[in-house]
Every structure is written in structure tokens, then in C-alpha cells.
Image (spheres, rainbow, N blue to C red):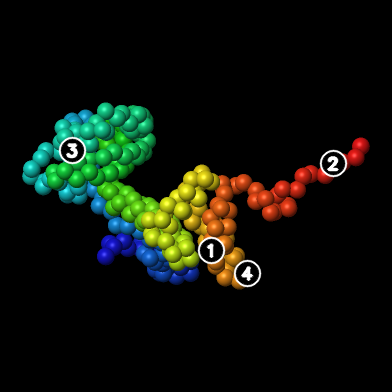
């Protein structure tokens, strides 16, 4: 459950001076929707006293790195030990500049936790140059963005699998028709389809799709026969080349008399 509480707004009655509480104009749900809150992420806080070099971490930062609070001293050495080997040489100039000027910054890198799992984290912070009453410091958050990355990869993998399934279904459908009409084995049907695709120089799925499109047209005209199948296989052509029977694509432009 969220600990967010809508702040009470006070309204002063001009007549009697009484203070009334104005009801909130939005709910926590409205706020979550407006901010686009979705996947729950592990978020940790950190603070660095730049005058002494001392660090403080919240429990979440220990957790995402695979430590318990008593096992390691917060600091640069501990963070560097968990950084992904491929990211150790990266220098984030924006962060250094932000620290110098006291501006907010955000950057990302990968870490490897105690169990050898790679995590993607986003570091958000802001440096303060300090003043007479307080020392310069760096404060911010570390966000474990690994779940979002995994969700994106899962969606991409699902789309690839779906496309592959659809592609294979079209191929198998065309092969099945060839086997039924020509009374040949699956190997022979596969070879006939491969030869048609090879002649046109197109992928097998596109060849199968063209064959099925041609056969559907033949079926509407009176049934799928061996002649119709042969015509469909021979009619497989490179994608984008105008069809010879289409007068709108093959007609020569008319010459304009001067």
C-alpha cells in the first residue's frame, strides 16, 4: 500500500476567520495514473558528505547489490566492486558537471550482484555546493530498472515467436495443399516450394503466401487442380515486380504530341 497522503489545504473564512479544510481535488489513484506508475521497482536512497567523504545508504541499495547492511562499508570501493566489467571504464561527464554546478543528474550502468546476476540500475542525484551552515553533499536515488528491461525483452521475444509461428503456419499450409493435390510426400512438397522461392529469389514464407493466394483465386473459379497448382507455383515472383497481367502496371505511357 502506498504511504502517499494528500496534503490538507486550509481555507480562511474572510468573515469569521475560521479555518476550513478543503477536500482534495484528486486521489492517490489519480496521481499514480498521471505519473504513469506501472511496474514496481526497487528504489534506494544515498547521501554523500563531500567534505568528509562519508556515505550513507538505505537498505534497498544493499539489497540490490546482494549485501546486508553489516557486511560492507558504504563507499566508492564497494560500489566499484559490483559494477559490471564492461561498464567500469565509463566516465559520466554529465554527472561530474552536475556535481560541480549543483545541478540534478541521471545516468545508468549495470551491476553484478553477489549471485552473479546482472542488474541495470539508474542513478539519480543532485550535488549541493554547501554553505556556511551545511557542508557540500550529494543526495539521490538508485533505481533497479531490471524488471522493466526484462519486460521489454519478453515482449520482443513474444513478438518474434508469434511471427515465426505465423510464418511456419503459412508454409505448412502450402505444403499440405501440394501434398494433397499432387499426391507427393512432405519432402517433395517442401522441395517444390523451395524451388519456387529460389527461382523468384524470395523467402520461403513469401513464396508460400503467393502460392496460397493463387490457389484461392483458382478455387473460386472452379476448384484446385494439378494445373492450378502448377500455375500457382510457376507464378511465384519477386516481391515488388509488376505482374504481367496488370494493365495499369505494364501499360506504356502515352506520348504527348508537340
Mark seen at residue 226: 1
Q: Which element carries disc 3, helix, strand or loop? A: helix
Please report whichever mark, 3 or 1, sits nearer to the chain's N-terminal start: 3
Judging from the image, what secondary structure is the residue with disc 2 in?
Answer: loop
Q: Looking at the image, which is closer to me, 177 or 92?
A: 177
Q: Which residue is mark 4?
A: 221
Q: Who is closer to the viewer here, 234 or 65?
A: 234
Q: Residue sitting at 55 percent across and 66 percent down?
A: 225
- Mark 1 lies on a secondary structure that is helix
**Distance Cα–Cα, label 2 vs label 3:** 74 Å
Q: Is residue 193 left or right of residue 148?
A: right
Give the residue pinned by disc 2.
255
User: Residue lying farthest left?
Assistant: 70
In the rendered view, tell whether residue 233 sits above or below residue 92.
below
Q: CA distance from mark 2 to mark 1?
A: 43 Å
Residue at (39, 53) in percent of width and height: 160
Q: Residue furthest right?
A: 258
Q: Is residue 199 above or below residue 27?
A: above
> Which of labels 2 and 1 is toward the front?
1
Indicate left or right for 127 with 78 as reference: right
| Mark 2 or 3, closer to the camera | 2
Q: Residues within 10 Å of mark 2 (few under 14, many from 20)?
A: few
**Dot 1 surroundings within 10 Å: few (below 14), some, or many (20 or more)?**
some
Q: Quadrant of the N terminus?
A: bottom left
Upstream in sequence: badge 1 or badge 4: 4
Report the residue marked by disc 3: 82
Question: Rounded to the nearest whole Å, what is the CA distance between mark 2 and mark 4?
Answer: 38 Å
Amino acid at each position: 500500500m502506498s504511504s502517499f497522503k494528500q496534503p490538507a489545504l486550509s481555507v480562511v473564512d474572510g468573515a469569521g476567520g475560521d479555518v476550513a479544510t478543503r477536500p482534495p481535488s484528486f486521489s492517490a489513484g489519480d496521481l499514480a495514473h498521471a505519473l504513469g506508475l506501472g511496474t514496481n521497482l526497487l528504489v534506494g536512497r544515498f547521501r554523500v558528505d563531500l567534505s568528509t567523504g562519508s556515505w550513507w545508504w538505505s537498505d534497498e541499495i544493499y539489497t540490490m547489490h546482494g549485501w546486508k547492511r553489516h557486511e560492507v562499508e558504504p563507499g566508492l570501493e564497494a560500489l566499484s566492486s559490483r559494477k559490471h566489467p564492461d561498464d567500469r571504464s565509463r566516465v559520466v561527464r554529465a554527472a561530474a558537471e552536475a556535481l560541480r554546478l549543483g545541478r540534478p543528474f541521471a545516468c545508468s550502468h549495470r551491476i553484478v550482484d553477489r549471485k552473479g546476476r546482472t542488474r541495470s540500475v539508474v542513478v539519480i542525484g543532485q550535488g549541493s555546493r554547501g554553505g556556511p551552515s551545511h557542508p557540500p553533499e550529494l543526495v539521490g536515488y538508485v533505481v533497479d530498472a531490471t524488471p522493466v528491461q526484462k519486460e521489454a525483452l519478453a515482449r520482443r521475444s513474444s513478438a518474434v515467436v508469434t511471427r515465426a509461428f505465423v510464418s511456419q503456419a503459412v508454409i505448412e499450409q502450402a505444403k499440405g495443399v501440394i501434398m494433397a493435390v499432387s499426391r507427393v510426400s512432405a519432402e517433395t512438397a517442401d522441395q517444390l516450394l523451395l524451388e519456387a522461392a529460389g527461382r523468384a529469389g524470395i523467402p520461403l514464407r513469401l513464396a508460400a503466401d503467393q502460392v496460397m493466394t493463387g490457389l484461392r483465386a483458382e478455387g473460386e473459379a472452379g476448384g484446385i487442380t494439378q494445373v492450378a497448382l502448377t500455375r500457382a507455383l510457376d507464378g511465384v515472383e519477386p516481391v515488388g515486380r509488376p505482374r504481367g497481367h496488370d494493365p495499369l502496371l505494364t501499360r506504356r505511357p502515352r506520348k504527348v504530341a508537340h
